[in-house]
Each structure stands twice: as structure tokens, then as C-alpha cells.
Amino acid sequence: MELSDHDRALLDGRDGPVPRQAMEALIQLGEAFDAPDMVDIGYAHVHAGMAMYLGDVELMEDLAGKGAQMRVPVSTNIANADMGNWQDTHAPEGLARLQQRAEQAHKAMGSANCFTCTPYWAGHWPTWNMHIASIESGVTIFANSVLGAKSNRDGFFAVYAGITGRYPRFGLHLDSKRKATHRAVVEAKPEGTTDFTALGYAIGAEVTNGIPWIGGLAARPDLDELDALGVGMATSGGVAMFILPGVTPPYTEDSEAAPENLPSLTIRDADVRRIYDEFCTGAAEDFDIVHLGCPHASFEEMKHYAALLDGRKVRDGIELWVTTNRHVRQMAADAGLLGPILAAGAKVIADTCPISCHFARTCSPDPTLGVVPPQLRTIVVDSAKQARYVRDMIHCPTLLTSTERAVESAVSGRFVPRF
């Protein structure tokens, strides 16, 4: 792999041991994927340091302790506790305190501590043709598809990219790889973000790791629906980019034409309904939590929740969680939106969500933290992504329905299905 003078200087230790360590790791990544060289990145969305994983926070503290500094704008991914309001989720205090240590480590390194899977709603909005690195699959597909930035689905390498400002040129950093591999014709008529997560889930299951060109939608999706569509595909498959003619970059006439000679699939209303059926496995009168905000809610979604809950009350014995990032939560507070949500008895939680908090059973926390996942009967969700990961990570039944019907379920105490 060809290295620039800057790359070689970092590799030689010019800027200290951490940039050298980061460059060594990025070179190994690049060589594994036959990258010809490296690119400059303009932004990175990086690993938070997860308190639920033994030794993980200490990894971030070690980097910070050695003087690591982020060279490009960096935002932090979702964490294992709401660091300012951990009591609302019944998290063990030891877990929250350990998670706060990761926050301090990132602060020392110059990261923007938003701790979210939707940093774009917190103002991190990479632009057309910018190379970035992202640990979060939902961020990757939104950036590639809606914003026209260039990113692979990364892991811890995003931290190293943030420290060096460099990343190997392979995968979706190559224009030759950013072309449709499948043609998806949508005959379904999705309404609202939940339908769009189910639509995306159905497409991703067929396309797996490809790039779908999507035609047939009757109306232009709004930003929240585009977000939902992407996370659905990224959850059921490894999709990291989609093309929606007339909506996603590059907005050329060629992009609007249906591609020929590609594998084709058709998604009908029955296929969308099948996703709901797949994730409705719990009992209609036997749920503990109703969860809204996967991916983390935007300001527009917070407005919607406030309107739905205004003057209403969550049923006794049920918890209604609204998860968003800390910046959107503050914007919602400033706009007077938290009042009706909190007055209804809902909890507005930042930094984490059900699948990322102490509910998870697929991790190895330090035994001294006192993490004991609760026995949950069922969680009502309005996102196919959350439904999939609740099943896989919490080992808990789900009931998938629309946002409006999820709120009705929380208020009535009885599940209200989408169909």
C-alpha cells in the first residue's frame, strides 16, 4: 500500500505512540482489503467505550492517558447508560459511573460527546464526497446514501481514523464500488417511519451486502423516513448504501433510470406486513416497556411524540421510554416539548436505549458492577431494528407496531397492532 510522507511520519512515531499505533492498525486493515493507498477523512463517528464490556472503557482511558487527540471532528456512538439520568432506567450506579469515565476520556481526546446512533440530528452532517469513518451501521448508510459522503461499516478502526485523519481507500471509498447491485421495486405503500423500517428490513434481507436501487415509492420520503429505511436495511443485511432516484445523490438522470441486467426484487404490502408478524411474538396484555426512538429520535419526532402524549397518561405498571441524543433532548426542552411527554409519565432517555443498556444479555460486564439483566416479559417497539436486536440481545419477545399505536398501547395497557 502506498503511504504518503505524512503516513510514514506517523508510522515512525513523529507524533507519539498513539498515532503510530493507530497508523499500524489502519495499514493492517488496508492491506487486508488490498487498499492502494489512504484518503484524508473529514469526520469520524467512533466507539464510545462500553461499560457493559469488560475492559472496554479502560481501552479509551488508555488512549486518552497516552495523550491521544482527535485530528478531525469526532462524535461518539451510543453508550450503556444515560450518564446524566441513569436512575430513570434503573441502571446500577456502578455501571453508570464506569460509563462516565469513558465520557471523560473522550472529552480529553477532543471528541464531541453526543453518545448516539444518530449524530446527524446532533449537528454532525458530513457533506457530499467527504470521506468519513463510522462505527455505527445506521450512520454509515445515512451518510453514504442521503448525504453523499463515503464510508464503510467500521469497528474500532473509526477511532484510529479519528486520531490520524486517515483511512485506507477500499470498499465504498472507491467510486467503482458505489454502484447499484440490485433493483428493488416497491409496490408497498409505506406510511410513517415504522413502515419504512419494515420496508428496509425486507429489502436488506434480500440484498444482503449489496447496494439496492429502489424504485416505485409513491411519494418522496422525509428525512426521518429515509433514516428508518436505511437502518432497516442495515439491520437485516449488511447494506451500507442505497440509491433512491431523484432523492439521493448524485441526482443525475442516469440515477433515475431503472438499472438493467441486475437481480431484481419486488416488495409488496404483504412483505412489509410479514416483518410486523415476524416481530410480534409477545402477548398483547403482557408487556413491560413501550419504546420509541430507534434510531435515536430527531427533533421532529420529539414534536410528534409530544403531540401524541399531550394530556394523556401512561398506564400504571407500564414504562414508556423515549430515547434520543442529549442534544435533541435539550432542544426539545428548550422548545417546551418535554413537558407533555414527561407529564404523561414517559421517560426521556439519552446516551443509550433498551438494547444498549443493562438489559443486554450478550456481553460480559465486570462482575463487581452488579449488572443483573431484569426479567422482561415483552417490549413494544416501533422500529424493526429495535425489534431484531431486542430479540437477539435481550432475549425478550417483542410487539412491533406504528408509533401512534405504540403510544396507544402505552396509554391503554393493551397492545394495539399496526394491522
Image (cartoon, helix red, strand yellow):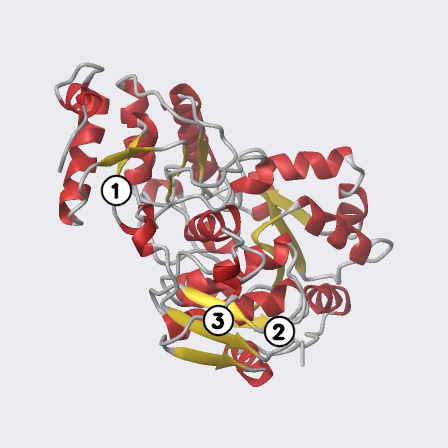
Which residue does the numbered mark 2 point to in the structure image?
A: 286
Mark 1 or 2, closer to the camera: 1
Q: Earlier in the sequence, mark 2 or mark 3?
A: 3
Q: Which disc number belongs to residue 25? A: none
Q: Residue at x 47, y 74 (%)?
A: 184
Q: Residues within 10 Å of mark 3 (few under 14, many from 20)?
A: some
Q: Residue at x 41, y 52 (%)?
A: 137
Query: Looking at the image, do the residues carrying marks 1 and 2 touch, with CB atoms under 8 Å apart?
Result: no
SS assignment at label 3: loop
Q: Is residue 356 visible?
A: yes
User: Quick one: 338 or 145, which is closer to the camera?
Assistant: 145
x, y percent for residue 263: 36, 77
Q: Residues within 10 Å of mark 2 (few under 14, many from 20)?
A: some
x, y percent for residue 402: 66, 68
Q: Quadrant of the N terminus?
A: top left
Q: CA distance from mark 1 to mark 2?
A: 50 Å
x, y percent for residue 364: 31, 50
Q: Earlier in the sequence, mark 1 or mark 3?
A: 1
Q: Residue at x 65, y 62 (%)?
A: 220
Q: Residue at x 43, y 39 (%)?
A: 95
Which residue does the numbered mark 1 point to in the structure image?
A: 169
SS assignment at label 1: loop
Residue type indicated by callout 1: Arg
Which residue does the numbered mark 3 point to in the structure image?
A: 258
Left-right relation of 318 to 54: right
SS assignment at label 2: loop
Left-right relation of 138 to 400: left
User: Quick one: 220 or 99, which is closer to the camera?
Assistant: 220
Q: Earlier in the sequence, mark 1 or mark 2?
A: 1
